[in-house]
Image: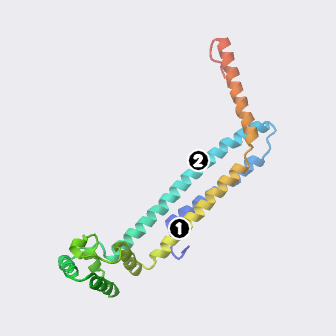
Amino acid sequence: MNHEKNVPEFDLLGAGIERMGELHSALAKVRSTTDRRQTPEARAFEYRKLHDQALAKIGLITQQARKALSDRRERLRTEAFEKSGLNGKFPQADEVRQVLRGLSQKERDAEINAAIDRGEYWVIACIRGQSPLLTGKIGLPMSVIEDLIISRTSPALDTELEDLKIAETHLNIAVDTFAREAERMRDVEAEGRAFEDAKAMTEATAAFEKALGTPAQT
């Protein structure tokens, strides 16, 4: 990615990925620490709670990072489009459309290509979004013409958009790696026994409260 200038969205992404690493290390520490006061089932149950909390935090980090990257992509495209002048309004627009409408399609396409080559992008601004009834049929889709002009007026745009794709790939890899490693440290069988024990204890406590006649004090 391009690191020649500070990009807040990439800084946010880097901080988020760093936080994922910290959470992974913390979970690994919890999983490897022995507490003789706890049974394997209790330890597995506790890890599962922390695991779920970590995943929820990762979800928030990911959502924030994705929104920042998406907002940057939209902003870059908007700025590039504005820089191209394609959204401008020109007093000679009606005249331009009339002249082009009077040409054959071959001549019309040639005139449009010539205007682009001369850097007269205002000509395109006069016809974009207009009905072929007003301009005559144009060979290339307007979106292709717009992309060509924007690539000339904002030559760095493609690189900046590619940087965003790379950043999103880094984010996806980090999230997938965290989820996989955090899942690997679970003891699913012990968790299952812990849930069964908790269910049995809830039922036993309910039976005791019923026999006692009042809710048991804890």
According to the picture, the residue beneath numbered tag 2 turns out to be 56
Secondary structure of the residue carrying tag 2 is helix
Name which residue lies at 80% across and 44% down: 34
Is residue 14 among the parts visible in the rendering? no
The front one of 49 and 141 is 141
Residue 38 left/right relative to 203? right
Mark 1 vs mark 2, CA separation in Å: 24 Å
Q: Position of residue 201 (x, y in %)?
A: 71, 25
Q: Which residue was labeled with disc 1?
A: 165
Sequence-wise first label, 1 or 2: 2
Name the foreground residue: 158 vs 67.
158
Looking at the image, residue 7 sits to the left or right of residue 110; the answer is right
Q: Secondary structure at mark 1?
A: helix
Q: Amino acid at mark 1?
A: Lys
The front one of 215 and 193 is: 193
Front one among 57 and 175: 175
Instruction: Indicate the position of residue 211 as horizontal and vertical percent values.
Output: 68, 12
Q: Is residue 9 above or below residue 89?
A: above
Q: Residues within 10 Å of mark 2 (few under 14, many from 20)?
A: few
**Amino acid type, label 2:** Ala
User: Which of the 4 image quarters holds residue 126?
Assistant: bottom left
Query: Which one is closest to the eye, mark 1 or mark 2?
Result: 1
Badge 1: few (under 14), some or many (20 or more) residues near its Cα, within 10 Å? some
Is 136 placed above or below 53 here?
Answer: below
Q: Is residue 69 left or right of residue 184?
A: left
Could you tell me residue 53's position as x and y percent? Answer: 62, 45
Q: Quadrant of the N terminus?
A: bottom right
Q: Residue at x 30, y 80 (%)?
A: 121
User: Residue 185: percent from the left, percent from the top?
Assistant: 73, 49
Residue 208 visible here: yes
